[in-house]
Amino acid sequence: MDRLASVFEGTLKAIEEGKEEIFNIYESTRSEIQRLKKELEFLRLEIVEIIKKVDDQQRQEKKLRQKLMEVNKNFHNYTEKEMLEIYIETKDAQVELQLLQAKELQLRTRRDEIERTLKNLDKTVQRAETLMNQVSLAIRLLKEGINEISQYYSKDQRKVTAFMIIKAQEEERRKVAREIHDGPAQSLANIVLRLEIVEKLLEIDHKKVKKELQELNVLARENLKDIRRIIFDLRPIQLNSEGIVETIRNYIQNYEKNYGIKCELQVKGTERTLNPAIEVALFRMVQEGMTNVAKHAHSATCKVILEFRENSVLGRIIDNGRGFDVKEVLSNLGKQFGLIGIKERIEMYSGKFNLTSIPGQGTTFEFELPYSK
């Protein structure tokens, strides 16, 4: 069994190293995308400017051609020197026009190349994300396999406990990393890109600069709101001093401020002192369910019901949002990482959960946790 565990761990290490390499490819690709987007924005500005110059030069060249035709028609009214000067000026204007048109064509060609490259890189990023998710799932399954070996064959159960703690920590870190990556990180990258565009616009169009800065102000405020939400979700909960109901009530008050969703809390039965682990699990279920409402439901209101029964506590989170096809979601549970986390957490405590939803009418997320298990 030691040999088998060693094989598991060796395989796990190799996969984790592979995941790190995939992540490096993912990050370098995203950096290249940002660089190309920046270049593309500058190219678009240059194309606008070159088109303006081409139009001006075409008008100038047309005037000079007309003047040259007039000189040729009435050559007896001009000296040889004047005729030569007009001819040279017209020729120079035609050459300048050809150079500007060639530059415009070059810029347009480069723009089209970048747009095609960006499409391909976006596909690469999507494939890398999918691959990282699949590798993460493989790592989790391997870790669970090692955990099962430890549970059945290890004499030192403290190792099992330590491993499960580490596993839980890594899962939380992954969740936080995903939250930051999908929210503030991308938003900040966008702000940096647009600030560089504003810097370029200062030399071209001052009126557009004011509009861009106003939009960046809004974007920065939204980004700050996302960061505050993540910090809020990470904030320690004072379950021991306040109790589960009061803790959830405080959470709901902050949730309303952060998301602008009106919430109602209903408590049925008599609140009772729960095992600390059950209290944490209950709070996390409410937190996860309400986060899903904010992210996906597009609902103006949310109702949270806690029902303290004889042997278990029942929770319901109800919204009046857009709803979805439950069968389709449950059949693709492997892609719904939030639901996977909820399902695993509930099963860990021998609980149950149920999901009902009607498209256009809202969703009810229901879970039950026994007191004693």
Image (spheres, rainbow, N blue to C red):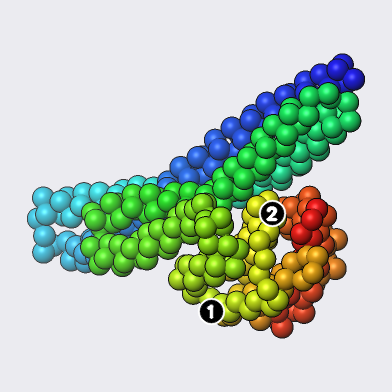
Give the quadrant of residue 9. Answer: top right
Instruction: Provide residue 19's location: percent of width, then percent of height.
Output: 68, 32
Instruction: Provide residue 52's location: percent of width, then percent of height.
Output: 32, 61
Give the quadrant of residue 194. Answer: bottom left
* Residue 59 appearing in the image: no
* Residue 319 appearing in the image: yes
Residue at image location 11% in from the left, 60% down from the top = 78
Q: Considering depth in this image, is 139 or 148 the residue closer to the camera?
A: 148
Label 2: which residue?
A: 275
Q: Tell which residue pokes out farthest to the top in this image.
A: 3
As displayed, is residue 135 above or below residue 353? above
Circle nearer the N terminus (1, 2): 1
Cα separation, mark 1 vs mark 2, equals 30 Å
Type of the residue with mark 1: Lys
Instruction: Provide residue 34's location: percent of width, then percent of height.
Output: 48, 45
Q: Secondary structure at mark 2?
A: loop
Residue at image location 37% in from the left, 59% down from the top = 220
Instruction: Provide residue 183's location: percent of width, then percent of height.
Output: 51, 55
Q: How many marks?
A: 2
Residue at image location 13% in from the left, 62% down from the top = 76
Instruction: Mark 1: give few (<14), some (14-19) or many (20+) Cα within 10 Å.
Output: some
Q: Is residue 98 left or right of residue 325?
A: left
